[in-house]
Image (cartoon, rainbow, N blue to C red):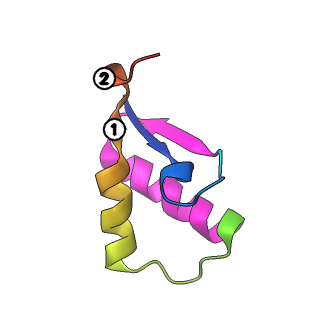
Amino acid sequence: MRLFECGTLVPGCEWHTRADEDAEVVRRTVDHLRQAHGETVIRENMVENIKTRIRDESTIQA
């Protein structure tokens, strides 16, 4: 399972999402950025920033 935590990109945001595929994580994150943070244009560098912050949940220590 792949995990993205918005707070790694937008300090203070506690939203997160999980999905089997990175593409789905990115899609959900872009939707979140538009709805919660008012982003109207998602540039390629933002997508790259999202991708670099996606982690494999199984490697995260509790």
> What percent of the width, then of the height, locates residue 8?
48, 51
Q: Residues within 10 Å of mark 1 (few under 14, many from 20)?
A: some
Mark 2–mark 1 contact, CB under 8 Å? yes
Q: Residues within 10 Å of mark 2 (few under 14, many from 20)?
A: few
Q: CA distance from mark 2 to mark 1?
A: 8 Å
> Is residue 27 highlighted in magenta?
yes
Left or right of 41 on screen, residue 55: left
Secondary element at tag 2: helix
Residue labelled with disc 1: 55
Specify the farthest residue to the front.
Answer: 11
> What percent of the width, then of the height, locates residue 23?
33, 52
Decide: is 14 above or below 49. Answer: above
Q: Which mark is residue 47?
A: none
Residue type at tag 2: Thr
Q: Main secondary structure of the magenta part?
A: helix
Residue labelled with disc 2: 59
> Is residue 35 highlighted in magenta?
no
Decide: is 58 above or below 41. Answer: above
Left or right of 9 on screen, residue 31: right
Decide: is 4 above or below 58. Answer: below
Residue drawn where x is 59% and y is 82% of the image: 40
Residue drawn where x is 36% and y is 28% of the image: 1
Residue drawn where x is 63% and y is 46% of the image: 15
Q: Which residues are magenta?
A: 15-34
